[in-house]
Amino acid sequence: MGAHPIRKEIQPPPVQNALKDQEPGAVLEPADTLRQVAPDIHATYGVIGVIDELNRGFNGNAYFVETGEGVVVIDSLGSPRLGRRWIETIRSHTDEPISYLILTHNHPDHSFGAIAFRQWTDATIIAHPGTERYLRSTPFEESVAFRKSLLGGDFAEFEPVAPDRTVDRPAFDGPLAIELGGQVLHIYNVGRHHSFGDLVVHMPERGITFVSDLYFQNRTTYMADGDLGHYFRAHQLVSRTLDTRLMIPGHGVAQKGPPFPMREKTVSYVRRLRDMMKEAVNGMIPLAEAVDRAEGAFPAWEETALFEENHRKNANFAYREMEQEVLFGED
Ligand SMILES: [Zn+2]
């Protein structure tokens, strides 16, 4: 078959359940994993793992909030086909119009379904101002080409989608607010901690925070598109200023807290990797050796998805950022 076998034990329970009833080789659809996470808020859960022919890019979660006057969707899933299925899932659940699509960041698993929202809804699409630079970047071109060759027809209608509105607030500053029906959503620009531009969505009256890919569970983070300094600033903003009782991630299941294990684990990983690489740079240990040392130093993370794909790249990236910091100082 060639595809990665799905590691069932690390999947969100809705994915595990859907896979149990599935015919071999069948494709997991957004409707199969739809669940309520809080009153008026639904999630669809993707497969935790890398893209392959079976999961067809359904590797992240997406959410929608019913406000009584319109639906606010958070993330579009990973392909035009999945975006279309996601819209159908929302429409079979509610008659409210789809008013907004917020793209938490531009990584393919979250944003490559956006064209379906452009084509099939009147939603106002909101994204980070970094989207423009991303859509002209090599990583964008490579991601599109790879997915077209792997997924064929799923990508037939793909087009880059420029947002109708960007969160044009300075990074780590106050939010862009949306009020619809009875619900208030604050959208924060949290810099480039993980991608060309990242957002966090907070519902201040309900203590709900959609953290997207700031914190992970069962999955090793990917740091190399972002900025390490921004990571800690984003974490500070979210942990110190946003009242959070329910934390809703881009991958995996929501957690009630505090404490939030996904936050503690991810931050400790990033912090430790940064400290190791800083020590290596200061100790004049060459890059390759430092990365090799980091490889075996995170045994707890070896069991998570994407460790093999991401960990060495993260170590490499952290080393180079620390090198810049030592040479040029912190910005
Ligand atoms: Zn993601």
Image: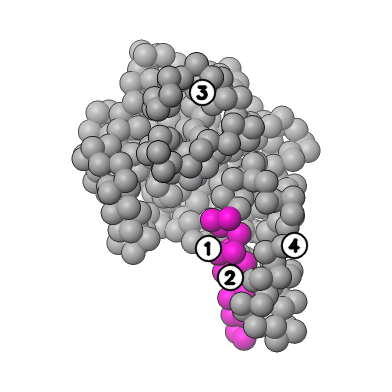
The region drawn magenta spans 308-331
Q: x and y percent of residue 323 in the render?
A: 62, 80
Residues at marks 2 and 3, CA–CA distance in whole angstroms: 36 Å
- Depth check: give the residue in front, 54 or 65: 54
Secondary structure found at label 3: helix
- Amino acid carrying label 4: it is Ala
Q: Residue at x 67, y 75 (%)?
A: 290
Side of 329 where 279 appears, left or right = right
Of the numbered discs 2 and 3, the one sitting upstream in the chain is 3
Of the numbered discs 3 and 4, the one sitting upstream in the chain is 3
Q: Are marks 2 and 4 in contact (CB under 8 Å)?
A: no
Residue at the spot of label 3: 19
Residues at marks 1 and 2, CA–CA distance in whole angstroms: 8 Å
Side of 45 where 90 appears, left or right = left
Residue at the spot of label 2: 316
Residues at marks 1 and 4, CA–CA distance in whole angstroms: 19 Å
Q: x and y percent of residue 109 in the render?
A: 43, 43
